[in-house]
Image: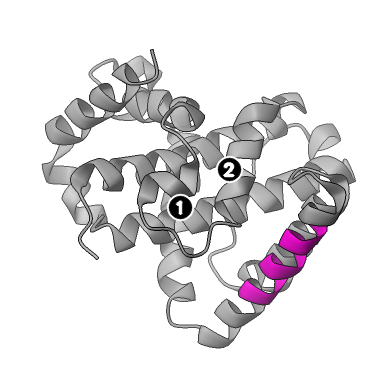
Amino acid sequence: MEHTYREQVLAFAGVWQAAKLVQDIARTGTLNNDDFEACIKTLFVTDPDTTEEVYGSIQAMKLGLNTLLDQFGDATNNRDLELTKYVMSLMHLERKLDREQQVMRKIGSGIELAKSQSEHFGSVTHETVIASLAETYANTISTLTPKIIVQGEQGYLSNSNNAAKVRTLLLAGIRSTMLWYQCGGRRLGLLFSRKKLLNQTKQLLNETI
């Protein structure tokens, strides 16, 4: 299926939204529940007709789009190297994962289990669902290198519920990274298409107003 550049940027925003929420938990112990739910839902849309279907709406990725604008915009003081490091690590891991079909199958089984749990509890962010997704991450992606080292307040990171949310968000970040590649995204391309990326990001943000 052909993918548009618009879809590619939307998927890229999904990566940054997951990374930003990881940072929020690590630094403050809190996150926006709507943004969190939007990330988790992407894990359960496994056979979409369009990229937008994965994210539910453009509005749901507003945090990711704004983060993308900060990272690639002209205001250099808005750029966050820690976030960039998280996203680059997700890209490296996704490429490794693409060659690990057995690990991919384990992830698929784990997501199916969590999906059935979310239907049972009526919520994708129920603590049982998040714990299940976090366990899937720990048993699969966490076994690959380079491991993602999350920086933040140890008191927040040592909290089991926060740790589970972080792992689940990293899993969602991998999902969006995978989709970004499927839509034609490449790391090298980011160096030569900054203006195009910014213009498309702004167009998508205009749709959230």
Q: Magenta span covers which residues? A: 108-117
Q: Give, as a three-letter code, the residue at label 1.
A: Ser
Seen in the picture, residue 69 relative to 92 is either above or below; the reply is above
Residue at 59% x, 38% y is: 38
For disc 1, the neighbor class at 10 Å (few under 14, some 14 to 19, many from 20) is many
Image vertical order of residue 71 relative to residue 49, above or below: above
Instruction: Evaluate whether residue 103 shows in this view.
Output: yes
Q: Residue at x 85, y 55 (%)?
A: 120
Circle number at residue 176:
1
| Structural distance between the alpha carbons of marks 2 and 1 | 9 Å
Residue 36 or residue 74, whichever sits in front:
36
Name of the residue lying farthest toward the bottom: 102
Look at mark 2 in the image and give the residue it sits on.
Answer: 39
Secondary structure of residue under mark 2: helix
Kind of residue at disc 2 = Cys
Looking at the image, what colour scheme do you see? Answer: one colour
Badge 2: residue crowd in 10 Å (few <14, some 14–19, many ≥20): many
